[in-house]
Image (spheres, grey):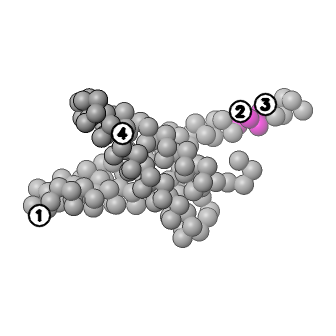
């Protein structure tokens, strides 16, 4: 019996690692989408960078949602419920990112790229945990 629990636990752990690495890969694709929109809007239409970044964030988030729904978590849930939860987690991640950036650049005077790398790592963990535990929670996990 104990060996069966170990096998089940090992299977769950392997699945969590698979999902985490898929989530990180999807995040990279979403980030590329974000930056493409940002750069395109600023350079081609002379858009305000903040507006362009916000547009890029939204596009990147939709890319992340769609890929995570189908690929990372292989969800069968209705989009209405999961999309609201996904974007709630994303908004908290955006606030967390901003807070880390303010703390590390303005209070501790870290270089902004070092700060962003640190923030990205923390937000990646937050977003994965929030989406694994809440947005795409599966029965039995």
Check disc 4 and report its element: helix, strand or loop. Answer: helix
Does residue 22 sit above or below 78 in this rendering? above
Closer to the observer: label 4 or label 1?
Answer: 4
- Disc 1 crowd, CA 10 A, few/some/many (<14, 14-19, 20+): few
The mark that comes first in sequence, 4 or 3, is: 3
Check disc 2 and report its element: helix, strand or loop. Answer: helix
Alpha carbon distance from label 4 to label 3: 38 Å
Identity of the residue furthest to the front in this view: 107
Closer to the observer: label 2 or label 4?
Answer: 4
Q: Are marks 2 and 1 in contact (CB under 8 Å)?
A: no
Q: Are marks 3 and 2 in contact (CB under 8 Å)?
A: yes
Alpha carbon distance from label 2 to label 1: 52 Å
Quadrant hosting residue 106: top left
Q: Quadrant of the N terminus?
A: top right
> Which residue is label 3 attached to?
6
| Left or right, 139 with reference to 82 | right
Q: Nearer the viewer, residue 107 or 67?
A: 107
Q: Which residues are magenta?
A: 6-11
The mark that comes first in sequence, 1 or 3, is: 3
Q: Nearer the viewer, residue 21 or 133?
A: 133
> Which residue is label 2 attached to?
10
> Which residue is label 4 attached to?
100
- Disc 2 crowd, CA 10 A, few/some/many (<14, 14-19, 20+): few
Q: Are marks 2 and 4 in contact (CB under 8 Å)?
A: no
Alpha carbon distance from label 2 to label 4: 34 Å
Does residue 58 sit above or below 100 in this rendering? below
> Which residue is label 1 attached to?
45
| Left or right, 35 with reference to 76 | left
């Amino acid at each position: 019996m104990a060996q069966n629990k170990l096998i089940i636990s090992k299977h769950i752990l392997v699945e969590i690692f698979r999902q985490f690495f898929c989530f990180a890969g999807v995040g990279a694709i979403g980030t590329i989408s974000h930056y493409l929109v940002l750069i395109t809007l600023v350079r081609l239409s002379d858009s305000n960078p903040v507006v362009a970044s916000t547009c890029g964030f939204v596009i990147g988030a939709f890319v992340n949602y769609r890929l995570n729904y189908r690929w990372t978590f292989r969800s069968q849930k209705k989009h209405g419920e999961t999309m609201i939860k996904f974007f709630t987690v994303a908004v908290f991640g955006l606030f967390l990112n901003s807070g880390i950036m303010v703390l590390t650049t303005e209070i501790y005077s870290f270089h902004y790229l070092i700060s962003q790398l640190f923030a990205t790592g923390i937000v990646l963990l937050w977003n994965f945990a929030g989406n694994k535990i809440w947005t795409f929670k599966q029965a039995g996990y």
